[in-house]
Image (cartoon, rainbow, N blue to C red):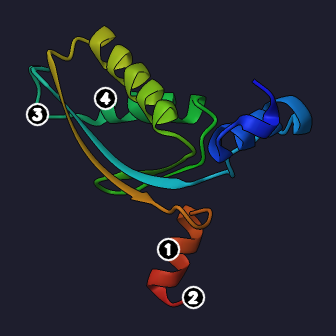
């Protein structure tokens, strides 16, 4: 099919693929995810060692994060990145003997600009 006879959307895609060779890279943090992970079936009311392990997994991911009293805020680019992090957290807690895990997840997704934890905190606190 020649480029002259292609519909506009196919032509646009064809042009990018064959002529421009542009690689689109998503900007750094498009989402701030507030995450709470509660392991169940641990046999103890204390969860601090599990919280510490989850924090180690998040730190090891290389993602920017801030731990709070009840939630940890994490800057992520994609839902795939979030899913990979959750799978690592789940594996770490399963290794520790957790029988069940309850997740509470809040996602602040911006489509128009990058989102950063520190900027959100500064705006909320009027700094």
Tell me, for residue 40, which label it has, or none: none
Q: Which residue is mark 2?
A: 127
Lower sequence index among marks 3 and 1: 3
Q: Which residue is mark 4?
A: 50
Residue mark closest to the camera, 3 vs 1: 1
In this figure, which residue is indicated by the disc labeled 1?
Answer: 121
Q: Position of residue 7 (x, y in %)?
A: 64, 41
Element class at badge 3: loop
For the point 81% across and 38% down, the residue is 15
Q: Quadrant of residue 116?
A: bottom right
Q: Is residue 24 visible?
A: yes
Quarter of the figure with the C terminus: bottom right
Residue 103, given in percent of the width and then of the height, sits at 23, 37
* C-alpha separation, residue under disc 4 versus residue under disc 1: 26 Å
How far is disc 2 from disc 4 in space, using C-alphas?
33 Å
Q: Residue furthest bottom?
A: 126
């Amino acid at each position: 099919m020649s480029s002259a006879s292609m519909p506009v959307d196919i032509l646009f895609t064809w042009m990018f693929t064959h002529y421009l060779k542009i690689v689109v890279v998503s900007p750094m943090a498009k989402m701030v995810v507030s995450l709470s992970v509660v392991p169940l079936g641990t046999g103890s009311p204390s969860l601090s060692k599990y919280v510490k392990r989850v924090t180690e997994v998040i730190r090891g991911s290389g993602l920017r994060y801030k731990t709070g009293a009840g939630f940890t805020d994490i800057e992520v680019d994609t839902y795939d990145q979030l899913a990979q992090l959750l799978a690592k957290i789940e594996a770490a807690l399963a290794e520790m003997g957790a029988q069940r895990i309850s997740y509470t997840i809040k996602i602040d997704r911006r489509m128009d600009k990058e989102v950063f934890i520190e900027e959100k905190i500064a705006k909320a606190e009027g700094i």
